[in-house]
Image (tube, grey):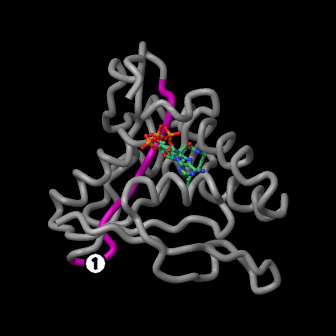
């Protein structure tokens, strides 16, 4: 890992982070899927999930389903956000990991994934799951490089019958 990421810390988000989390997630989502998904779907998802009032409401955990937003911060700047929770007694779910585009590829996504993994383990999880859009080579490559394997294909969240947008469900044991 490059030394520049050694100064980065992951922490629970606080109310004052909501604006930055909403901005980072909206921007990263649009950039990541621009060539993969229809613009209407992207805007529908961004406005549903990453509007600031919703992010602000979801800063706090609702255990065990949602551990609350986590952020990675370096030199006083929030550079990325993640979140997850338990989907069953033994299974955790990573709901999202998004970074500032310029900060990709230097270990910050792994730091956030490690944080959610620790939270799932502490809640008794022995496996963890993530949904990645089918065809998202970066997302799939990232999770594969961290030990996740594809299990099944499902209709993506927020997808309407006529969108035909699918997600890949990926799993990793963490016992
Ligand atoms: C995906 C994302 C969270 C990864 O975070 P990151 O900080 O860039 O990733 P890291 O630097 O921690 O690790 C990258 C690892 O993934 C691997 N990886 C990334 N893209 C890959 C690809 N297309 N194919 C193969 N491996 C890939 C790298 O090889 C690296 O592994 P290594 O350290 O063993 O060499 C980040 O790039 C991001 O926000 N992307 C946009 C949003 C997104 O696609 N999210 C995924 C769905 S939630």
Residue 139 included in the magenta stretch of the image: no
Query: In the rendered image of this protein, does residue 99 appear above or below residue 84?
Result: above
Q: Is residue 8 left or right of residue 130?
A: left
**CB at disc 1 and ligand 1 closer than 8 Å:** no
Q: Which residue is mark 1?
A: 88
Q: Is residue 144 left or right of residue 7?
A: right
Q: Give the residue displayed 77% in from the left and 56% down from the top.
A: 43
Of residue 113 and residue 69, the one placed in the foreground of this image is 113
Query: In the rendered image of this protein, does residue 170 appear above or below residue 139?
Result: below
Q: Give the residue displayed 40% in from the left and 64% down from the top.
A: 148
Q: Give the residue displayed 33% in from the left and 67% down from the top.
A: 172
Q: Position of residue 116 (x, y in %)?
A: 32, 51
Q: Which residues are magenta?
A: 78-89
Q: Quadrant of residue 104?
A: top right
Q: Quadrant of residue 25?
A: top right
Main SS, magenta residues: strand
Of residue 123 and residue 37, the one placed in the foreground of this image is 37
Query: Where, quadrant-wise, is the N terminus in this rendering?
Result: top left
């Amino acid at each position: 890992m490059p030394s520049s990421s050694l100064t980065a810390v992951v922490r629970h988000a606080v109310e004052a982070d909501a604006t930055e989390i909403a901005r980072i997630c909206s921007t990263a989502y649009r950039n990541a899927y621009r060539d993969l998904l229809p613009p209407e779907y992207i805007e529908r998802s961004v406005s549903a999930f990453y509007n600031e009032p919703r992010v602000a409401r979801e800063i706090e955990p609702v255990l065990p389903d949602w551990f609350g937003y986590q952020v990675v911060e370096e030199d006083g700047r929030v550079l990325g956000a993640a979140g997850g929770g338990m989907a069953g007694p033994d299974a955790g779910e990573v709901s999202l990991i998004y970074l500032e585009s310029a900060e990709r590829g230097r270990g910050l996504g792994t730091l956030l994934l490690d944080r959610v993994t620790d939270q799932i383990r502490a809640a008794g999880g022995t496996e963890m799951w993530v949904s990645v859009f089918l065809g998202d080579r970066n997302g799939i490559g990232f999770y594969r490089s961290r030990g996740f394997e594809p299990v099944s294909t499902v209709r993506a969240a927020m997808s309407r019958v006529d969108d035909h947008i699918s997600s890949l469900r990926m799993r990793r044991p963490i016992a």
